[in-house]
Each structure stands twice: as structure tokens, then as C-alpha cells.
């Protein structure tokens, strides 16, 4: 039996369904589903994603069955519509659209009005009695076909259109007459011949297959690849192609097109939300060429159609049990749905919709938790304008508040320039409107500002999906050229600072301070559900119930912020960061240049009270929660990277000749310090350093305990690779801490453990676990040593590895399960076997990565630890891991 590649939908029946998303793409699957449940959908057919996969596998050749199946489906479509593609007397026109399993708005191609030629346009005039819609549709088709299939720049057609409008003395496209549009068709065909070297194609079957080719080709265009890279979309077969009977929103004042959402995609409010344009086609709305009207205006102009659209909206939301993003066209008073999909939404909207739908009984709490992505939570924690600073500022202009949050940056006018400055400068991308080609620059920018377009324009939709603050349709922004614009009548050039507030739509001159929002309201309620789920986890190989989230924090301020964000302890406190304070670095440098243990101890005595105070502040902020303190880790040379002036100052304060200091600095130089004299190796050769730190930890713990607060210090010895290293250092640390406890008369429980970051430590974990009370996986260094990659130099080849798919993801951002993950799994199993109650966690930056958190849960770790601002993200990812993998 021949494989099936083409699926028909129409007249209430469909060969596909919503469950066939991988095969039909999101658009095709939902068109089939809507047809089956009685939604008014123009009939058509979908060419499956398998064809796209075969197309690329076979050097852009289709499987032999495809052309025959397309012809059969086209015949069905012609029969359903009572019209024929290319028939000069009774012509059928179709749209050709893309649609992958995961929505990629605007990244791939669309061609409308296909089937137009010099004969069918006249037939359309006779068929409808409306010459204007016929010639308007023909000129649109030539522009789309020329741009999409032949690569003629869209702007070339726009220049001709603008020129004709100027000649006729009109402002809008809709002001042009049928004769004007006929002239426009003629000029477009001249441009096509000039650029392509041949006449515009009149054979409609050639048009159809050229359009299908173009849609499949667009799967691999630069902007689609960039979108998949930015959004980490992998493993898809490709795009489907949807061929659908055209309905015309450009028929006149009784026709139109629009985009609507069943709830507000910016705020999540349960209000019918959207925009429309009368006498227009869908691309006019999406491209932002004309600024559309709010959907509420349709209720006034066409109340019956609006009521029908509202009823369809309610049906679709109940059917899909999620907020829907719908495209519709009205042709001479008749409503048609062209698409529905689960709508992209801001973080704020995602949380509100999830919470509201639970309360409405549409979904369960577990479903709500799975509906909100970690990226949504990240967006919610994006900065907003400092309220006090904003009171003193005056807005230059106000547009539509397309995507919430605030951003400040230097103006750039091109996506290319934004990408060039990525990582160097903070920029705001200022454009008339954005297009899919701008995707890279939009990703690089802090925020986006456009002078045209509405809430459903490309800039608005993509910015919301990315979580970028965005203000669109700001009429007071006038682009003068590629280096200048006017905002509110004032001229700005590239490099000038502006601030945008995507929550209110305001634009300000200069830099306004930003603040991080608090967790409250619906977000607080939602995160409460998240915590209930992750803390309910019970796993056989874990000694304690639940899956915890700690933070990496080196200061009381960081600890306080992390606790506000829901951290359940500190998983990594890096003591070396404390030594760089001006009050401590001089004493520490004196210790480094000292010749004898006695001299080192003398310098360390100066540091002891200062180090103790650091720990006091952290223990006070984290009272009642565990705090894991990593003893000194970096090589000593990092602390003596000094200028000549600093060397002279140290010479005077320490009473040591400057030349001797230079010699000592030179002696500390290592060929590869990452594999050199650092971590526990420092503690073994200079045990007085770790002894001072252990004393400071216990002195601080006892002091805070005397205040009546619970303190749970955990001392972590870094870079252990051999059992004897841990035995040597643990004996000295325990001795010091017990002495402090004894003299203070306070009972403080503590643990001594190690950081598993050397591959050898993972391989002999059972031996190390016999002396360690916890393992904290330092996955940054473990990744570095396992791959043999330098974190500092990997940028020179990593982009090529990712592009060529040698690596699926940056292993320093998302844990490599296949290699590094196996070492973590092995160490966890061996550690638990040797010490059943051992605590296990991850403290590298992988502790904030959702995929790595899922892995940590699956291999039985007790907790993950991440930077303070990623704690809420990690809480959600941890709960999702529990749901996904079972409790």
C-alpha cells in the first residue's frame, strides 16, 4: 500500500485530527480538527511533514506518490468549491501556507491568491462583479510570488506601490481604484521580468508547485534556522504545506480580516482580544503595514459576525482547554476561520491563564504547572521601571504596550547592528516595523520599538514569545534614515539612550533605573502549587521527601534575595569572592607572599574576624536552612594580579621588598592553573588557610545560634579526586570546628562533604563517600574536565559544533547526559551504596537549567542549586520534573 502524504479537510469531514500534529503540523492538524467539529473553515489539504523530510533527504525531490496525491486532493477541493484552479470562467484561488509541529510565527513562507493570471483575473471580475477585489488580489499575488519564490525584495514592490499612490494623490492602498490596481499589476509584472528575466508565470499548476517548493525550502532558510536555534527547537521532521481555498477579506467594506485571542495574551485577562482591518487580507495585519482597529470595533460594524466569532472563540477554548490564537476572514459578511493554535503569551499572561483555568475547572493544578514554561517565569522577573524614578521622568511618546517589562539601551535601527553589538552594548531596536528577517536582532536587543503595527503584528507576537519588552504602533516615532529618528518631535541618532516600558507603552529619553519585581498575587499562588508538587516527591533512593531548590550566594544580600524567591538553603557559597573585598585583599596578599606557616597564620589572623562576619550575615539571612560553604578553590595567582602601584603599596604595608613580591608572583604562575595548584591541593600544602576558614565558619555559626536562630553549616572541600585528600583535610577541619564548639558552649550540627568535579572522584565515589557526608556536583568543572574543553576558550569553536549538530546544546549551559551525566549517575549510585543517607545535589549553573534539573531528579539527587534570580525558574522546573517522571 502506498504511503499517505496528503490529507484532505472540508465540508465537515477531515482525514486528520489535532492528535496528528507531528505529521500535519500545528496548522494542518488544527484545520482538520476545526473542520470535524463544525467550525466554518475553507476546505483544503495538507501535505505532511514527512514529505518535507523526504524532500531534503532526496536532494529536494518529492516521493513519487506526492504529485499524484496532490492532484487527487486538488480535484476534491475543486469539487467541494464548485470551481476549478485556472478556469478562466469559474476560477478557484488558493493559499499556500507553512505549518510545523511547533509554531514558528512568520518564520516560513505564505503565498495568497494563487491561481491568478491574466485570464482568471478577468473571470474573477465576471464571477464577482467586483473588479477592484480581482485586481487587488492579483497585484498581491505577484508581489508574494515574486518575493517568496523568486527572491525579489519586498521593498521593490512597495516602492512601486508608494509611487503610484503619490501619483494618484492618495494615502491608503484602499483608496486606489480598480484601474489604478490594474496599472499596478502591469508595473509589478515589469519588475518581475526585469529581476527574473522571464514573464510572470501564467500556468497555475506551475505556480502551485513553485509555491509548494518555496514553503518547503523556507524550512531551511536563515530566519527559520535562527528561530529554532533561539528557541531550542529540535527533532522536527520539517514543515507541512497547507493548500486551502481562498476567501477574500479585501472584497470591500463588508469584508475584512483579523487576528484574535480568546484571552489577552499580554495580561492573561479573560477578555476577547484582537484586531481587524476591513477590506484587507491577513498579511496586512501581521506585517504591520496598516495599523488595525481593536476587535471591539467589529461588534459595532458587524454585530452578527462578531457574535458568531465570539461563539467560535468560546467553543475552541473549551475544546482545546487553552487560550487560542485565531486568524479569521470575513468575505461579504460570511465568517471563516483560517487558523487556531494555542496562543503565545507573556509570562504574566501564562501564569494568570493557568491559575484562572484551574479555578474555572478547565484544567488541573498539574496541567497548570505544565502549561507555564520556565521561560515564562524568567520573563515575570524581568526588570520594570523604578517607580520613584519614573515619577520624575516624562514620556516622549506612547504606543501600544505589546510585551511587558521595561528595557533601557542605545538606539540601533537595523537587526544586523543589534547582532553586532550583542554582548557589548545594551540596545533597543527601533524600526518602522519588524519582519521575520529581523529575528536575530530582536533576540539580541533588550527591547523593541516600532512606529507602525498593532498588537498582533510581527514585532508584538515575536517579542511576546521571546519575553522582550516591546512598544509597537508608536505614531510619534518617525524613522528618518538608517541612523536617525524622531521620537515625540525630538531627533535621536544611533547610540542615543532611550527607555521603553512595554507594560504601559511609554517611551522615555535616556536611562531610567530598573528594579526587579516582587513575587506576589497569582505568581505567588502558582508557585505555591509548584512547591506542593515538588515537595510531595517520594523516591526510593532518596533519604528525604521532596525535591529541593537551593541557591548559589556569596553575600547576605544575595542570600536575602534568594530566600525571597523561595530558596531552601544555600548550595554553594564561594568564599574566594569574599577575599576580593578591599578590606581583605591586602591581608590575603600578605598571606600569599609569606615564606613560613607562622607568617601565613599571622596574616590569616587578620582575616579571621572579617571572614567570620561574612558568614554571620549569611547565616542570619538563612536561619533555619542549610548553608554549604566551599573552602578556597581558585589558584593563588588570581589574587595577586596587581599593577606596579599595588605591588609598591603591598611592599610598604607588609614590609617586604617589591622585588621579592614580584618573584613570588612569578613563582605562582602555572601553565594550566585550572588543573594546577588549587582547591583541596591548596588546603593540603597550606592547611592553615582551610583551618582559618573552618574556624570562621564555626565561630559565626555559634554566634548566630546564640541569637536563638537555627544554623546548619555544611563545609565543602573542593576538587577532591582521592580519598586520602579528603581524609587529611577533614581531620583538621573537624578538629578546629570541635574546638570552637567546645569553647563557645553552643551545640551546632554541621556536615563536612566534598564537591564532585574531578572525573576520578566520580569513579571512586564509594571510597570518598565513606568520609563525606554530602556530595555536591560541581558540574561546571566536571564538564570541563570530562570534555577537555576550557570554559574560557570554548567560544572559539562551540558555535560551529552547535551549527553542525556535533553538539545538541552548549554543555556548560545544559548538562551533557550522555557523558558527564553518566559520571553524576555513577557517583550518586556509588555514594548512596556506601553511605545510604548521603545528601546529593548540583551546585553548578546547570542547577538552573530545566533539562539538567529534570536529569537531576531522574538520577535521584536531593536538590539543585542555582543563582538567586533563577530560583523561581528552578522551582517550576523541579515540579515539572516530578510530574513528568512520576513521584
Image (cartoon, helix red, strand yellow):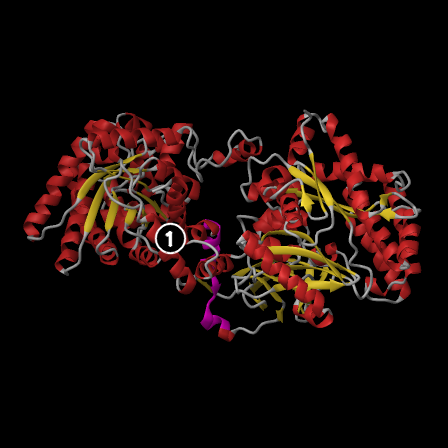
* Left or right position of 784 against 77: left
Question: Is 383 a magenta residue?
Answer: yes
Q: Is residue 491 visible?
A: no
**Front position in the image: 645 or 761:** 761
**Callout 1 crowding tier (Cα within 10 Å): few <14, some 14–19, many ≥20:** many
Identify which residue, 183 or 17, lies in the foreground.
17
Q: Quadrant of the N terminus?
A: top right
Q: Examine the rendering and report whether any part of residue 499 can be seen.
A: yes
Q: Which residue is mark 1?
A: 530
Residue at 54% in and 31% down: 801
**At which x and y percent is residue 766?**
23, 28
Q: Position of residue 261 (x, y in %)?
A: 60, 59
666 lies above or below 389: above
* Residue drawn at 35 percent across, 50 percent down: 533
Residue 458 in the magenta stretch? The answer is: no
Left or right, residue 692 beside residue 500 = left
Q: Is residue 533 above or below residue 512?
A: above
Secondary structure mainly formed by the magenta segment? helix
Q: Residue 432, relative to residue 301: is it above or below? A: above
Q: Quadrant of residue 180?
A: bottom right
Looking at the image, residue 575 sits to the left or right of residue 312; the answer is: left
Q: Position of residue 291 (x, y in %)?
A: 71, 64
Residue 824 in the figure: left or right of residue 796: left
- Stretch in magenta: 373-390
Task: Say which element carries label 1.
Answer: helix
Q: Which quadrant, please, contains the C terminus?
A: top left
Amino acid at each position: 500500500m502506498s504511503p499517505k502524504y496528503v490529507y484532505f479537510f472540508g465540508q465537515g469531514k477531515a482525514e486528520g485530527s489535532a492528535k496528528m500534529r507531528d505529521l500535519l503540523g500545528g496548522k494542518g492538524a488544527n484545520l482538520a480538527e476545526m473542520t470535524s467539529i463544525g467550525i466554518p473553515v475553507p476546505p483544503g489539504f495538507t501535505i505532511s511533514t514527512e514529505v518535507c523530510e523526504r524532500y531534503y533527504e532526496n536532494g529536494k525531490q518529492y516521493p513519487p506518490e506526492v504529485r499524484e496525491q496532490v492532484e487527487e486532493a486538488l480535484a476534491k477541493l475543486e469539487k467541494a468549491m464548485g470551481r476549478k484552479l485556472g478556469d478562466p470562467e469559474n476560477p478557484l484561488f488558493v493559499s499556500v501556507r507553512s505549518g510545523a509541529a511547533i509554531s514558528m510565527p512568520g518564520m516560513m513562507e505564505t503565498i495568497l491568491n494563487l491561481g491568478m493570471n491574466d485570464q482568471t483575473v478577468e473571470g474573477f471580475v465576471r464571477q464577482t462583479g467586483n473588479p477592484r477585489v480581482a485586481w487587488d488580489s492579483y497585484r498581491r499575488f505577484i508581489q508574494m510570488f515574486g518575493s517568496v519564490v523568486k527572491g525579489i525584495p519586498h521593498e521593490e514592490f512597495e516602492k512601486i506601490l508608494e509611487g503610484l499612490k503619490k501619483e494618484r494623490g492618495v494615502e491608503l492602498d484602499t483608496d486606489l481604484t480598480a484601474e489604478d490596481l490594474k496599472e499596478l499589476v502591469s508595473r509589478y509584472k515589469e519588475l518581475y521580468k526585469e529581476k527574473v528575466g522571464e514573464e510572470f508565470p501564467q500556468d497555475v499548476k506551475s505556480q502551485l508547485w513553485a509555491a509548494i517548493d518555496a514553503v518547503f525550502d523556507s524550512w531551511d532558510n536563515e530566519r527559520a534556522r535562527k528561530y529554532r536555534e533561539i528557541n531550542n527547537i529540535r527533532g522536527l521532521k520539517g514543515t507541512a504545506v497547507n493548500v486551502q481555498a481562498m476567501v477574500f477579506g479585501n472584497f470591500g467594506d463588508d469584508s475584512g480580516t483579523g487576528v484574535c485571542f480568546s484571552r489577552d495574551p499580554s495580561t492573561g485577562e479573560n477578555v476577547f482580544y484582537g484586531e481587524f482591518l476591513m477590506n484587507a487580507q491577513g498579511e496586512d495585519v501581521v506585517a504591520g503595514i496598516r495599523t488595525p482597529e481593536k476587535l471591539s470595533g467589529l461588534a459595532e460594524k458587524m454585530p452578527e459576525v462578531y457574535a458568531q466569532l465570539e461563539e467560535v472563540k468560546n467553543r475552541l477554548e473549551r475544546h482545546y482547554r487553552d487560550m487560542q490564537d485565531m486568524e479569521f476572514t470575513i468575505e461579504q459578511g460570511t465568517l471563516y476561520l483560517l487558523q487556531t493554535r494555542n496562543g503565545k503569551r507573556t509570562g504574566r499572561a501564562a501564569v494568570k491563564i493557568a491559575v484562572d483555568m484551574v479555578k474555572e475547572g478547565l484544567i488541573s493544578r498539574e496541567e497548570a504547572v505544565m502549561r507555564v514554561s520556565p521561560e515564562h517565569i524568567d520573563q515575570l522577573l524581568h526588570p520594570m521601571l523604578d517607580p520613584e524614578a519614573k515619577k520624575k521622568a516624562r514620556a516622549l511618546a506612547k504606543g501600544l504596550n505589546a510585551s511587558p517589562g521595561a528595557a533601557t539601551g542605545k538606539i540601533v535601527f537595523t537587526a544586523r547592528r543589534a547582532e553586532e553589538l550583542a554582548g557589548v552594548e545594551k540596545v533597543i531596536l527601533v524600526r518602522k516595523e519588524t519582519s521575520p528577517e529581523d529575528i536575530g536582532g530582536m533576540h539580541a536587543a533588550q527591547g523593541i520599538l516600532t512606529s507602525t503595527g498593532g498588537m498582533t503584528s510581527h514585532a508584538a507576537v515575536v517579542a511576546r514569545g521571546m519575553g522582550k519588552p516591546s512598544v509597537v504602533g508608536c505614531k510619534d516615532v518617525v524613522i528618518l534614515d538608517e541612523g536617525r529618528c524622531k521620537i515625540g518631535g525630538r531627533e535621536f541618532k544611533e547610540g542615543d539612550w532611550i527607555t521603553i516600558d512595554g507594560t504601559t507603552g511609554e517611551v522615555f529619553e535616556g536611562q531610567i533605573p530598573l528594579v526587579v519585581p516582587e513575587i506576589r498575587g497569582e505568581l505567588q499562588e502558582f508557585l505555591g502549587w509548584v512547591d506542593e508538587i515538588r515537595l510531595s516527591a517520594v523516591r526510593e533512593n532518596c533519604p528525604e521527601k521532596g525535591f529541593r531548590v537551593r541557591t548559589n550566594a556569596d553575600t547576605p544580600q544575595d542570600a536575602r534575595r534568594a530566600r525571597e524567591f523561595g530558596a531552601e538553603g544555600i548550595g554553594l557559597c564561594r568564599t574566594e569572592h569574599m577575599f576580593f573585598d578591599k578590606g581583605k585583599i591586602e591581608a590575603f596578599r600578605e598571606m600569599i607572599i609569606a615564606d613560613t606557616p607562622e607568617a601565613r597564620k599571622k596574616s590569616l589572623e587578620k582575616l579571621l574576624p572579617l571572614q567570620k562576619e561574612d558568614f554571620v550575615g549569611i547565616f542570619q539571612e538563612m536561619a533555619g536552612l542549610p548553608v554549604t560553604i566551599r573552602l578556597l578553590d581558585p589558584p593563588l595567582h588570581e589574587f595577586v594580579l596587581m599593577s606596579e602601584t599595588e605591588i609598591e603599596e603591598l611592599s610598604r604595608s607588609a614590609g617586604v621588598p617589591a622585588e621579592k613580591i614580584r618573584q613570588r608572583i612569578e613563582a605562582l604562575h602555572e601553565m594550566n592553573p585550572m588543573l594546577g595548584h588549587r582547591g583541596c591541593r591548596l588546603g593540603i600544602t597550606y592547611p592553615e588557610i582551610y583551618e582559618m576558614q573552618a574556624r570562621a565558619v564555626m565561630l559565626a555559626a555559634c554566634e548566630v545560634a546564640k541569637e536563638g536562630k537555627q544554623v546548619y553549616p555544611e563545609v565543602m572541600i573542593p576538587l577532591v579526586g582521592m580519598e586520602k585528600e579528603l581524609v587529611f583535610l577533614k581531620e583538621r577541619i573537624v578538629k578546629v570546628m570541635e574546638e570552637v564548639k567546645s569553647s563557645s558552649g553552643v551545640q551546632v550540627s554541621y556536615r563536612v562533604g566534598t564537591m564532585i568535579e574531578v572525573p576520578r572522584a566520580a569513579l571512586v565515589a564509594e571510597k570518598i563517600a565513606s568520609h563525606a557526608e554530602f556530595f555536591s556536583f560541581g558540574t561546571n568543572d566536571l564538564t570541563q574536565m570530562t570534555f577537555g574543553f576550557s570554559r574560557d576558550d570554548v567560544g572559539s569553536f562551540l558555535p560551529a559544533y552547535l551549527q553542525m549538530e556535533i553538539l545538541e546544546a552548549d554543555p556548560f549551559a545544559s548538562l551533557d547526559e550522555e557523558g558527564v551525566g553518566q559520571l553524576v549517575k555513577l557517583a550518586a549510585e556509588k555514594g548512596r551504596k556506601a553511605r545510604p543517607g548521603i545528601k546529593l545535589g548540583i551546585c553548578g549553573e546547570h542547577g538552573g537549567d530545566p533539562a539538567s534539573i529534570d536529569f537531576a531528579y531522574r538520577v535521584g539527587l536531593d536538590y539543585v542549586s542555582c543563582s538567586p534570580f533563577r530560583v523561581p525558574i528552578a522551582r517550576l522546573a523541579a515540579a515539572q520534573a516530578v510530574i513528568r517522571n512520576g513521584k
